[in-house]
Amino acid sequence: MRHRIIEVRQEIYNHNENEVSRRWAFEEGIKRPYFHVKPLEKAQLKNWKDYLDFEIENGTLERVVVLFERCLVACALYEDFWIKYAKYMENHSNEGVRHVFSRACTVHLSKKPMVHLLWAAFEEQQGNINEARRILKTLEDSVPGLAMVRLRRVSLERRHGNIDEAEFLLQDAIKNSKTPNESSFYAVKLARLLFKVEKSLPKARKVLVEAIDIDKESTKLYLNLLELEYNSDLKLNEENILNAFDIAISSSMPIETRIAFSQRKVEFLEDFGSDVKKLMVAYDDHQQLLRDQESSKRKAEIGLEEPEEKKQRNDTTLESTQLMSGDLQANQAAYNYNAWYQYNYQTPWNYGQYYPPPPT
């Protein structure tokens, strides 16, 4: 009996020694097992991550939980480890997940958005919609002005059929925007909600037109207005499409961007227009824009200095024009301006090159 007891104890000892040896390198790498406000070194963070991955793959639930708790003493301010802990607990206990998120969001990471968003998403998956609302509202009150939080609140309400509340949240964001660019961002989101979800083209159009009055040089606003009109029946909505083009062309955007809009107006009338007179007027207007651009270039060549503000604005012209082309091509529902159009508008239309005279 004595030998049997010794054998059993020896087996336990050997097993423990083997397990300790497998983890010894990770334990040796832990230089700061206590909490401190100073950041941990990258080597320390990597060691904790590798140690956790090893334990998750080889250890038991109890060992993994103990290691996570040890890790979160030293790494309490790193949301990646809290998120990793919560994701691990998803396979074992919903209450455990909730407890991890609660500790992270209410004690250690009250102003970190990502862990709050994940907690709200978890509660929404569990059917706790009011709790998800509370989490997002608390975060926005703690860290106001984060677009990602406001948009998550909007999408939460939309998913659960509260369209009026979603619309109110976006209108409130527009009203409280601190810059025209921020206001334009939310206006585009609101217009898409009104058009795609509520199926209200007039309300969506009104939102974008009002936004343009505030931010007159936002290329994205004009693009989204055009996209909105294009998504309707082209034949029935021709006047509104042309009006959207005219708003962009008559704006205070750089002349290169307005020329790009003007060219697309001519292309639209060429392909879908119902009145050739409008096509010819659009062509003449486009030629006038090109002449204005050429006149500006000549003035610069003869030594007339441009204002510094205008120079800076011109630096962004190419980017805005490329953005305009890219946004229209990225949306398949929008009118597809592709490489087939290569009109040379700086010279009169020379139909002779396409239609040679019949042989005599």
Image (tube, rainbow, N blue to C red):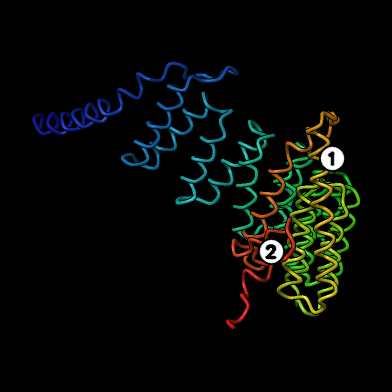
Measuring from the top left, give residue 74's x and y in whole percent: 51, 23
Disc assigned to residue 159 = 2
Q: 270 or 296: which is nearer to us?
A: 296
Residue 60 position (above or below residue 346):
above
Q: Residue placed at 77% from the left, 63% from the top?
A: 226
Residue 232 position (above or below residue 181):
below
Dot placed on the residue nearer the N-terminal end, 2 or 1 = 2
Q: 23 or 44: which is nearer to us?
A: 44
Which amino acid, mark 1?
Thr
Q: Is residue 113 visible?
A: yes
Q: Are marks 2 and 1 in contact (CB under 8 Å)?
A: no
Determine the image quadrant of residue 14: top left
Q: Is residue 162 visible?
A: no
Distance Cα–Cα, label 2 vs label 1 = 29 Å
Disc assigned to residue 179 = 1
Which amino acid, mark 2?
Arg
Q: Mark 1: few, some, or many residues within 10 Å (few <14, many ≥20)? A: few
Q: Residue placed at 79% from the left, 61% from the top?
A: 225
**Placement of the N terminus among the 4 image quadrants:** top left
